[in-house]
Image (cartoon, coloured by chain):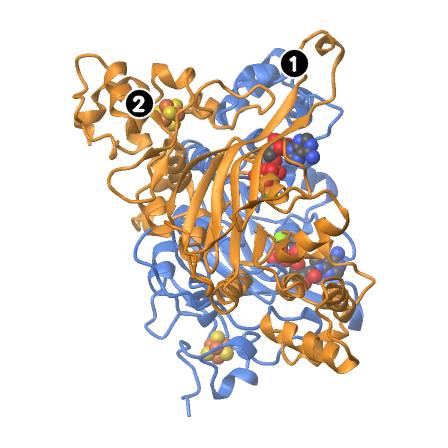
Amino acid sequence: MRDPVLEIRGLRVDYGLGDAAVHAVRDVDLTLHRGEVLGLAGESGSGKSTLAYGLTRLLPPPGVVSGGEVIYHPVDGPPVDVLSLSPAQLRAFRWAEASIVFQGAMNSLNPVHKVSTQLLDVIRAHEPRSTAAGRLARARELLKLVGISADRLHSYPHQLSGGMRQRVMIAMALALEPQVVIMDEPTTALDVVMQRQILGQLAELRERLGFAVLFITHDLSLLVEFSDRIAIMYGGRIVEEAPAAELYRRALHPYTDGLLHSFPALRGPRRELTGIPGSPPDLRAMPTGCAFHPRCPRAFTPCDAELPPLGPPGDDDPRRAVACWLHSATAPAPR
Amino acid sequence: MTLSESAAAPVDEVVLEAVGLTKHFPVRKRLRDLFSRTPAVVHAVDDVSFALHRGRVTALVGESGSGKSTVARLLAQIYPRTAGDLRLHGTSTRVRGGRPFRSYVRRVQLILQDPFASLNPVHTVRYHLTRSLRIHGNAGRSAEDLEQALAKLLTRVSLTPPERYLDAFPHELSGGQRQRVAIARALGADPEVLLADEPVSMLDVSIRLGVLNLLQDLKERLNIAILYITHDIASARYFADETIVMYAGRMVEGGDSEIVTQNSAHPYTRLLTASAPDPERITGDGAGAGIDEAAGKDRGQGEPPSLISPPAGCRFHPRCPHAMRRCTADLPPRLTVGDRPGHWTACWLYDPATVAADAPGSAAPDADPAVPPPPALVKREDTATLGEAR
Ligand SMILES: Nc1ncnc2c1ncn2[C@@H]1O[C@H](COP(=O)(O)OP(=O)(O)O)[C@@H](O)[C@H]1O
Ligand SMILES: Nc1ncnc2c1ncn2[C@@H]1O[C@H](COP(=O)(O)OP(=O)(O)O)[C@@H](O)[C@H]1O
Ligand code: SF4
Ligand code: SF4
Ligand SMILES: [Mg+2]
Ligand SMILES: [Mg+2]
């Protein structure tokens, strides 16, 4: 396996303090390897965005990181703990080392400034010694990279379609050739044709530039095709992690299995869609034991009392991890 | 299909029919347009014809901006139509407010994408459903009648036990539950037609299935005609009997859902199906391979045209890898695809004479145009060899 570029260890994120705190991200361990696409999927409210904001320290109040660490491994030089960077270091880290494209990012372009101004600002802020001509050339190149002709550089955001604006945001995220790109539902608001164009470009760019992507979406069908590995989040925890194809062919966690049987497939024989009964958990009143147990068709004795740890499955495939008593090596025997 | 005269309504009976339905929205005039003779309009929907059948789901599929919601609003008669006709049980109908509109709405109900926006947050489920029952004269005579009708509605949409939901406010319900309440409210009218405009687009994947199954159940048990509008063509495959594809305000293909999705004929439908997420495409080693392959090469052309001055001829021609000379000038008519009954497409590729004329010498006139190779594999200049390429 490739070297880790970003390691998240025991990350906890709360909204609010003390007893009123909502634990939105709970003891998350997740490793992103150099150059890979790691997909993160789960129902809305499962904590995906909170995780992305938390690990880049962009959490809006009342969000607080209440535990854990995020270790970034630069190409050369010693590892850094992102959570203990000073504000100045953090500014240097963002964009240059790790950049993020948020949900609805296409609406976060400033409407009163031309695309060129906004792209050039990002480049200038991090490469103050570059020349104006050099920056302009770089901006053109970036637009070309995401499939937008350079003559659009001086457009205002409203003169571009949603798909183009989203690609401009991706261009910005890639401007400083970061090692890590975090994308939170980057194509959810777009039509499938545009979505595939953007993902195609992203895959190409990833080949060429070698950055790693943490790709967050609620659409698991998209991830299976597009990711190297997939992690599934439920109620603030990672409940399963596996190579994309393995996860698709043989889901271990009943929640993953439910997700995979929730969407109709365009190709192949018509499958039976079972879906997932019930609704996502309320973070303020989390079920005891395995958070999925009230909805789980396979729940058994230990499930409502004991939290299953995330670990290698019974068959000990080192590439996989699952948090379910059905597959735990240390599982109490079903009665 | 023939209309049966029998009193016991047959399953295939046409309930609502759109004939050449057209909607142009006026565009605010700019100074330089003042002198032009034809006022600028958005050609949102042009010449749309299809029928909704009792006990059948018809899907209307297309990208955003293709005119799906406008079609739904024309069918609901919320918008007056620019041209064309709307026939309810074969009788032309045009209502503008007042009692005729109410009596039309009783039979044709619209469900919107966002159940949050369509339910008033200050009112309970009971209020919303009672109002619908009363307006449409289905509340009965007594308080017990009403209670019974309310319980029946909630049970119909699987919100049980009804007591748990009757006095809830919209914000106390999950997205899926809210959409069920919106459906129950529509059922309060006891309609013959449900127009569901992207009813599950805002819901979580795991919740969608339940709501779609509910629509299917209503179709079967209440024998309602359903228009299911979606941008997700895979869901049309599973939940609609018939699928119609729209592009830039026009219908481009239609037929049995399985055939339209598995043997797509129109180059646009093929682009749509090639772009949809497809887990079966994975090969197991690494990412992106499938994505790259299907992405196509025409980057600059990846977007639908302006509807203020739509392209002449076939509206897809600026993006179409198969475009022929004729495509830029003449509007393609509906042509039958192969020998599959009911499968049609509006594309010149399915007119052997046009294909032959475009490629003098190389394309055999008797080539089977019903099976052109997938768009991704054919470049524009290859059109000439279409006949052999299959
Ligand atoms: N500002 C906030 N204050 C309180 N709770 C929040 C806030 N933002 C998000 N949450 C809660 O945190 C949980 C996780 O949310 P989020 O990370 O947005 O999930 P996802 O991205 O998976 O949909 C949700 O239950 C949500 O209600
Ligand atoms: N009330 C309106 N006034 C002007 N243009 C409109 C109006 N409603 C829709 N349109 C335009 O008509 C076209 C079709 O829109 P719509 O029916 O909403 O498409 P869809 O539902 O497929 O996304 C779009 O170009 C849209 O901008
Ligand atoms: S631990 Fe138990 S309840 Fe949780 S997913 Fe596994 S079987 Fe189901
Ligand atoms: S071949 Fe011609 S008619 Fe058919 S979709 Fe392409 S441009 Fe339109
Ligand atoms: Mg989110
Ligand atoms: Mg719409």
Query: Label 1 marks which chain's residue?
Result: B
The residue identified by callout 1 is: B38
Q: Secondary structure at mark 1?
A: loop
Q: Position of residue B270 (x, y in %)?
A: 36, 37
Q: How far apart are the two marked residues, 1 and 2, measured between alpha carbons?
A: 37 Å
Left or right, A103 with respect to B311, comes to right
Q: Quadrant of residue B38?
A: top right
Chain shown orange: that is B
Q: Position of residue B332 (x, y in %)?
A: 39, 25
> Which image quadrant for residue B34?
top right
Q: Position of residue B123 (x, y in %)?
A: 81, 64
Who is closer to the viewer here, B130 or B92?
A: B92
Check the image and name the residue furthest to the right: B122
User: If the image is split into quadrants, where does the C terminus of chain B sit?
Assistant: top left
Q: What amino acid type is highlighted by mark number 1?
A: Thr
Judging from the image, what is the letter of the chain drawn in blue?
Answer: A
User: Looking at the image, can residue B297 be seen?
Assistant: no
Residue B200: image location, x then y, percent: 57, 55
A136 or A167: which is nearer to us?
Answer: A167
Residue A22, above or below B363: below
Describe residue B75's horizontal placement relative to residue B289 as left or right. right
The residue at 25%/20% (across/down) is B353
Label 2 is placed on what type of residue? Answer: Lys
**Looking at the image, is A287 positioned above or below residue B36?**
below
Identify the residue under disc 2: B379
> Residue sitting at 33 percent across and 61 percent down?
A249
